[in-house]
């Protein structure tokens, strides 16, 4: 799917995803909190969607959220109001971030690289806008390490992609490796379907 196709899909999903956020908190909340809960300074949430990550970030951070979908961002704005927090939200393609090099202390993203048409380009952009001593944090889904579950995922992969543009058997670590970035720390959960990563921004590459 192209970026405009994905944008159109998420215009449809935005309100449904917002309504189901309680379920995400139940299932994914702990992984988001563990991977994102200690970021500091100026933080960029790439493909922030409805703002699901926001509640897990320290109150002290200076938060910027970007997403390709104005409908998702509208829900993120409401989420900020509900949480009593402030942030700058901008419509932007993760593969072409409109920020200068070394702008952020931390770049975070959740459940997103699976929908970017060019996830390696998006990771290079995350790395470019992150300070050299900063940190990139991801919470992603991928192919299960349990064979029957992986088979089920593979069976539904094409249908799921056609509906949402999401490659749900994509392996997050392979994308990070393809981008030439170093993984500092990783964890997996939910039968290998969830991977959380702490990554170092590349030093000067792709700039
Ligand atoms: C599954 S949602 C995840 C949203 C949020 N990060 C979360 O964890 O709930 C994927 C998000 O990626 C956004 N997205 C997809 N392609 C994008 C792109 N090229 N640039 C920016 N955002 C994009 C979608 O609009 C959607 O909000």
Image (tube, helix red, strand yellow):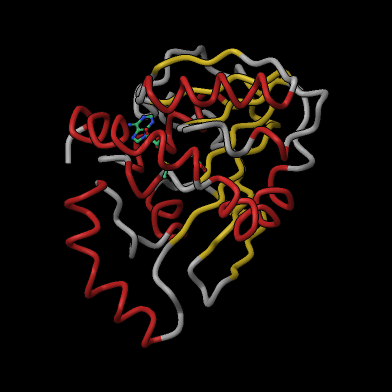
Q: Is residue 169 left or right of residue 79?
A: left
In this rendering, the answer to whether 118 lies above or below 178 is: above
Q: Quadrant of residue 160?
A: bottom left
153 vs 93, nearest the viewer? 153
* Extreme-bottom residue of the structure: 148
In percent of width and height, residue 10 lies at 32, 35
Q: Quadrant of residue 185?
A: bottom right
Residue under the point 49% across and 38% down: 18
32 vs 187, nearest the viewer? 32
Residue under the point 45% across and 32% down: 47
Residue under the point 30% across and 29% down: 11
In this rendering, the answer to whether 157 lies above or below 7 is: below
In percent of width and height, residue 111 lies at 47, 48
Q: Quadrant of ligand 1?
A: top left
* Image label count: 0
Q: Is residue 66 left or right of residue 137?
A: left
146 vs 156, nearest the viewer? 156
In this rendering, the answer to whether 143 lies above or below 162 is: below
Q: Is residue 35 left or right of residue 188?
A: right
Q: Is residue 167 left or right of residue 124?
A: left
- The C terminus, quarter of image: top left
Residue under the point 56% across and 51% down: 139
In percent of width and height, residue 56 lies at 72, 40
In percent of width and height, residue 148 lies at 36, 87
């Amino acid at each position: 799917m192209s970026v405009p196709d994905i944008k159109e899909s998420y215009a449809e999903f935005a309100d449904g995803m917002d309504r189901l956020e309680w379920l995400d908190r139940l299932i994914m909340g702990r992984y988001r909190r563990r991977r994102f809960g200690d970021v500091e300074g100026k933080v960029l949430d790439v493909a922030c969607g409805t703002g699901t990550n926001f509640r897990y970030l320290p109150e002290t951070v200076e938060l910027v959220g970007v997403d390709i979908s104005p409908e998702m961002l509208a829900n993120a704005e409401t989420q900020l109001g509900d949480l009593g927090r402030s942030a700058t939200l901008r419509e932007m393609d993760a593969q072409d971030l409109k920020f200068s090099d070394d702008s952020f202390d931390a770049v975070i993203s959740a459940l997103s690289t699976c929908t970017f048409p060019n996830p390696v380009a998006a990771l290079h952009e995350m790395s470019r806008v992150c300070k050299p001593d900063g940190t990139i944090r991801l919470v992603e889904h991928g192919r299960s390490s349990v064979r029957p579950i992986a088979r089920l995922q593979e069976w539904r992969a094409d249908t799921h992609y056609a509906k949402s543009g999401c490659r749900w058997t994509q392996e997050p670590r392979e994308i990070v490796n393809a981008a030439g970035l170093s993984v500092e720390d990783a964890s997996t959960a939910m039968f290998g379907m969830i991977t959380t990563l702490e990554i170092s921004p590349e030093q000067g590459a792709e700039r």
